[in-house]
Image (cartoon, rainbow, N blue to C red):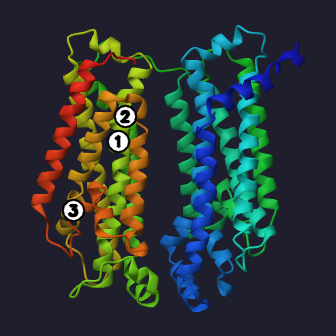
């Protein structure tokens, strides 16, 4: 009987490849292109050994160690060492996130939506689905490793050789395989996709925090996090393979455990039983907004903590940036030079714009949750009651705007607290808070544009993420590439006053809010006219 457990694995793999024929190439090409671009950027940004050594000294700051890991090759900080040191950990986290999303999508989400039951009705083995997604993710991460290694090698940078590139790419691939195994294990524990995804991401964050704490306080603690292991590969410096093999060995154990748990549990069940709900709903849940808030409460808290930590991370390094900026010419090109303001003060608008764009992500996710509910046929249950479409849309709108306000507030709070703790000349918390909230109208425009897509072309809603990525590129790197002013105006973030070096532009803010309101009205007209579920 056991020999039939994996029947149909190859067929299901091809089916998954068919479903992800666009998603997978986008992930892989994005990782490859970003890695190559950043390596080339480092070559142009730091044109001699003195500038690289200055950067290396800045990275010995405990806050930077917590963010990117302990430095290695510091005495001879080449472009290769810099690329691996500053990019490997962050990229490994995103690769891990990719693996988690793909595994949960093809396991617990498909099971929750009833697709696995349909598959099981065909002549396939009990473990075919889990084994097929795990084999697929192994293949995807191997391809990722080869693509990244190849893209780095062809750059012909002196300190980036083939062996180091293979180590770098393999470390990323091993991280992806490990988190695919962890996600497959989490998918067996809960009976719904949301809990499985939340636990998987929580494990990822826990590993990152454990490594950060260990790297700053006690190295022994770091060894409890696999993210710390991949950093020990020390690509382009010592090129160790054993951390990668250790990561793959642990991933294999998690895969075996996930397959075993999948074999012994019933379909649509999990090993952690869902808690029974209350006999009567609370008053909060008796309104559409209450339900929307309850469904998104965990995500709101998670993103809020993340933005607060990002603000603290940025703020904690402000004390040492003044001397660093004086030595790096290209960094200064990213900053709008204004007489009467220090370089750190002129750097604040850039930090605010980055945190605002990051804060826009949970706001957009909040409004896009409407599409998810519609796709899963849960929207019809609400609309079948005495709830109008406008009332429902407004509930999601309020949640999205509230998310934007909370994210901007926490990011500026973290930046202000940490920055004032390390700066001799303190910043006004009111000024920082105002500089952050100045971006709220721009976020509202992004939300309004999403409502238009939801109302008229729901299939194209993912396009808002491309527009947000374009906004990030233009706002963050516009100074470096010397884009003309009109390019910046193609995104709503380009109309926001750069406080504190500029005064608040209330007219622009009013216009942005007006544009956002027009978008919302147009989107709601479309939402009221079209069929739900199409």
Q: Which mark is residue 433?
A: 3
- Pinpoint residue 132: horizontal percent, then vertical percent: 75, 29
Which residue corresponds to the image point at 43% horizontal and 80% vertical from the top-left?
A: 331
- Compared to residue 126, the image places residue 331 above or below, namely below
- Pinpoint residue 413: horizontal percent, then vertical percent: 28, 61
> Which numbered disc, 3 or 2, marks the residue that appears first in the sequence?
2
Q: Secondary structure at mark 1?
A: helix
Q: Alpha-carbon distance for marks 3 and 2?
A: 27 Å
Mark 3 vs mark 2, foreground winner is 2
Q: Is residue 283 visible?
A: no
> Which numbered disc, 1 or 3, marks the residue that appears first in the sequence?
1
- Pinpoint residue 77: horizontal percent, then vertical percent: 65, 83
Give the quadrant of residue 258. Answer: top right
Q: Which mark is residue 364?
A: 1
Left or right relative to 468: residue 157: right
Q: Which mark is residue 368?
A: 2
Which residue corresponds to the image point at 33% horizontal and 12% vertical from the top-left?
A: 381
The reply to whether callout 1 and callout 2 are in contact (CB within 8 Å) is yes
The reply to whether callout 1 and callout 3 are in contact (CB within 8 Å) is no
Q: Is residue 9 visible?
A: yes
């Amino acid at each position: 009987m056991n020999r039939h457990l994996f029947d149909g694995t190859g067929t299901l793999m091809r089916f998954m490849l068919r479903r992800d024929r666009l998603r997978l190439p986008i992930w892989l090409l994005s990782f490859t292109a970003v890695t190559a671009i950043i390596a080339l950027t480092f070559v142009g940004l730091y044109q001699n050994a003195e500038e690289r050594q200055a950067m290396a000294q800045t990275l010995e700051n405990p806050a930077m160690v917590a963010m990117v890991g302990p430095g290695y090759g510091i005495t001879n900080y080449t472009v290769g060492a810099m690329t691996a040191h500053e990019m490997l950990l962050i990229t490994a986290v995103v690769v891990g996130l990719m693996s988690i999303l793909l595994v949960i999508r093809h396991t617990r989400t498909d099971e929750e939506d009833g697709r696995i039951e349909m598959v099981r009705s065909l002549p396939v083995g009990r473990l075919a689905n889990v084994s097929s997604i795990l084999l697929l993710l192994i293949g995807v991460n191997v391809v990722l490793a080869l693509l990244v290694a190849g893209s780095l090698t062809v750059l012909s940078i002196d300190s980036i050789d083939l062996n180091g590139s293979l180590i770098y790419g393999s470390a990323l691939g091993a991280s992806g395989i490990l988190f695919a195994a962890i996600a497959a294990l989490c998918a067996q524990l809960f009976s719904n996709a949301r809990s499985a995804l939340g636990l998987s991401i929580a494990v990822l964050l826990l590993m990152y925090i454990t490594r950060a704490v260990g790297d700053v306080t006690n190295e022994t603690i770091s060894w409890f996090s696999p993210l710390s292991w991949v950093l020990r590969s020390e690509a382009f410096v010592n090129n160790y393979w054993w951390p990668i093999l250790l990561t793959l060995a642990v991933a294999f154990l998690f895969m075996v455990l996930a397959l075993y748990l999948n074999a012994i549990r019933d379909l649509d069940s999990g090993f952690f039983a869902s808690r029974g709900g209350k006999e009567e709903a609370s008053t909060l849940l008796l309104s559409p907004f209450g339900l929307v808030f309850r469904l998104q409460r965990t995500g709101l808290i998670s993103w809020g903590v993340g933005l607060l930590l990002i603000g603290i991370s940025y703020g904690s390094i402000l004390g040492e940036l003044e001397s660093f900026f004086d030595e790096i010419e290209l960094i200064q090109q990213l900053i709008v030079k204004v007489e009467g303001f220090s370089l750190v003060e002129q750097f604040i608008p850039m930090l605010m714009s980055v945190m605002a764009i990051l804060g826009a992500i949970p706001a957009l996710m909040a409004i896009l949750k409407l599409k998810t509910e519609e796709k899963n046929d849960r929207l019809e249950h609400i609309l079948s009651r005495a709830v109008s479409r406008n009332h429902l849309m407004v509930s999601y709108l309020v949640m999205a705007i509230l998310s934007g306000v909370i994210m901007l507030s926490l990011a500026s709070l973290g930046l202000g607290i940490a920055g004032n703790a390390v700066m001799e000349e303190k910043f006004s918390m009111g000024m920082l808070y105002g500089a952050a909230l100045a971006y709220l109208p721009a976020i509202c425009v992004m939300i309004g544009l999403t409502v238009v897509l939801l109302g008229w072309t729901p299939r194209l809603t993912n396009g808002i993420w491309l527009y947000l990525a374009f906004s990030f590129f233009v706002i963050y790197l516009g100074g470096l590439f010397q884009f003309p002013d009109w390019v910046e105006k193609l995104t709503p973030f380009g109309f926001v006053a750069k406080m504190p070096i500029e005064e608040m532009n209330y007219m622009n803010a009013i216009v942005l809010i007006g544009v956002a309101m027009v978008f919302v009205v147009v989107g709601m007209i479309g939402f009221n006219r079209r069929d739900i579920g199409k």
